[in-house]
């Protein structure tokens, strides 16, 4: 949220529209994200596996890291690691799901 507000502040002061990546400073991969989500949601006996796409091609399960250097020039830095952010999001999702039942 603080990154969004920082960039909006620049827009309000007449600067041209910019696009910023907001992320963390380390890499993560989809299998790690799946593991964290299943653990955080308390799911048991879950098998996580990479599958093929509908066209039969294997999905590439690589690493992901956004280039956040542009927004860091505005003196912004991430407060959470990728794994911490996934845990927070999964926990909030779980709380939302529990509150709807």
Image: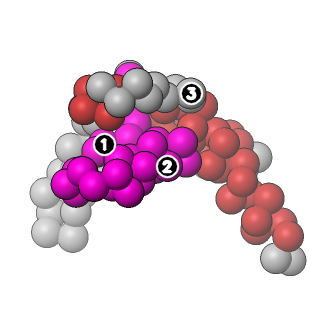
Residue occupying image coordinates x 15% and y 63%: 56
Mark 1 highlights which residue? 21
Q: Is 17 included in the stretch rendered in magenta?
A: yes
Q: Is 88 included in the stretch rendered in magenta?
A: no
Q: Is residue 12 above or below residue 81?
A: below
Mark 3–mark 2 Cα distance, whole angstroms, equals 15 Å
Residue occupying image coordinates x 38% and y 57%: 12
Residue 89 pos. (x, y %): 62, 49
Disc 2 packing (10 Å; few <14; some 14–19; many ≥20): few
Mark 3–mark 1 Cα distance, whole angstroms, equals 15 Å
Query: What residue range appears in magenta?
Result: 1-25
Sooner in the amino-acid sequence: mark 3 or mark 2: 2
| Numbered disc 2: secondary structure | helix
Q: For this view, does 68 lie left or right of residue 40? A: left
**16 vs 22, nearest the viewer:** 16
Disc 1 packing (10 Å; few <14; some 14–19; many ≥20): some
Residue occupying image coordinates x 72% and y 48%: 91
Mark 2 highlights which residue? 5
Mark 3 highlights which residue? 79
**59 vs 80, nearest the viewer:** 80
Q: Tell which residue pokes out farthest to the bottom in this image.
A: 101
Point out the image quarter for the C terminus.
bottom right
Q: Is residue 74 above or below residue 50?
A: above
Residue 1 pos. (x, y %): 55, 48
Sooner in the amino-acid sequence: mark 3 or mark 1: 1
- CB contact under 8 Å: marks 3 and 2: no
């Amino acid at each position: 949220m603080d990154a969004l507000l920082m960039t909006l502040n620049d827009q309000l002061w007449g600067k041209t529209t910019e696009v910023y990546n907001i992320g963390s400073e380390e890499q993560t991969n989809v299998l790690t994200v799946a593991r964290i989500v299943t653990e955080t949601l308390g799911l048991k006996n879950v098998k996580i596996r990479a599958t093929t796409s509908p066209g039969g091609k294997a999905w590439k399960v690589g690493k992901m890291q956004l280039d956040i250097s542009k927004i860091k020039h505005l003196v912004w830095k991430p407060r959470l690691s990728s794994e911490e952010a996934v845990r927070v999001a999964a926990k909030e999702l779980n709380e939302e799901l529990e509150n709807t039942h």
